[in-house]
Image (tube, grey):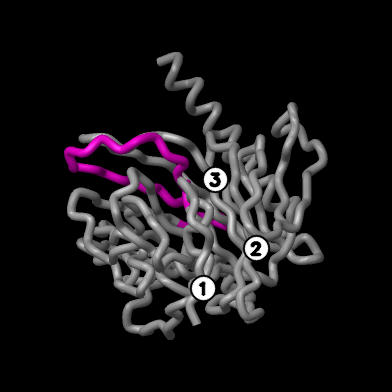
Amino acid sequence: MRKRISPVYYTIFAFLLFSWHTKGQNTDTLRYIDNGEIRLGVDMSAGGSIFYFAERKTGRNLLNHNDKGRFVQQSYYGDIDGSYWAKQPWRWNPVQGGGYLGEPAKVLESKIRKKSLYLKSRPKHWATGADIDSAVMETNISLKGDLARIHFRFSYSGQHSHQSCSQELPAVFVDYDLPKLVFYNGKNPWNNEPLKQVVPGWPNEAQQSDECWAAYTDSTGWGIGVFTPGTTALTTYRFEGDGKTGPEGSACSYFAPIREFSITPGFVFEYDVYLTIGNIDEIRERFCQIHFKNKLASNINHKL
């Protein structure tokens, strides 16, 4: 049975709340990279979106991929365009994975090696399932130690200037069995001050992560962390669905780092994301090292 959310003027938060068209994955379309410590998988029938991330020693996938919208993936928003998502007025919405009825986004180019990959894809309009020919999404992923580094790139060649919207950078869907959202909210980031823990509810909640990362963990403090340098605002929720947890379950835990900007002719946007798995102290320390390494590189480049 299909479910429906109440109409709203604009929200990125309702993006993929319901598990309407869940289908088993075709394993022929799945590709993995592996460095012996972590393993990451992408679905070539979903624009190369990231559906799998696990420690090699456990093999437990912490991501949720219940439908074409539930991945770690790119998605963007523009003007209301007359489209409808399940009878709800929607807007221009290129999504890396595909459309809400399960329409698969196309991979245009791929280069996959043992520890890295590159993908170029054509996004689908979430509501209509149509190819968005004016947009291209690119993904570069490399594994090093306990970290996956993802470089996302979005290019828009259309002629329409969209209004400014909140954008997911990126959308992150994980196993509902990881209930605690952990992050730093305070005036002294990267000084090892106490972290904040919440268990998000339904619908969306806004949070502020002043170290630009957040992690979903279990009761022991172990889980998955996501770091988007330069992005402090978060939106988050947990959706219970039919109660089934796990990578393909209807239930999910979600968050997205968000920034507000408009997509206009000639628009190109690039950003980095880092994924890691561990206990919360390990996650924070790894991201802290990246932060100070990036800061040092920025200072050197500025002096040059």
Rendering coords of residue 179 (x, y %): 72, 64
> What amino acid is at disc 1?
Lys
> What amino acid is at disc 2?
Arg
Rendering coords of residue 231 (x, y %): 54, 37
Q: What's the residue at 72%, 51% (across, down)?
A: 182
- Which mark lies nearer to you, 1 or 2? 1
Instruction: State the residue in front, 48 or 21.
Output: 21
Q: Which mark is residue 3?
A: 1
Occupied quadrant, residue 85: bottom left
- Asked whether residue 60 appears in the rendered view, the answer is no
- Which mark lies nearer to you, 3 or 2? 2
Rendering coords of residue 209 (x, y %): 66, 40
Disc 1 is placed on an element classified as loop
Q: Residues within 10 Å of mark 3 (few under 14, many from 20)?
A: many
Q: What's the residue at 46%, 36% (across, down)?
A: 260
Occupied quadrant, residue 210: top right
Decide whether residue 44 is among the magenta residues: no
Query: In this rendering, is residue 6 above or below 76?
Result: below
State if disc 2 and disc 1 touch (CB < 8 Å).
no
Rendering coords of residue 248 (x, y %): 53, 79
Image: magenta residue range: 143-170
Disc 2 target residue: 238
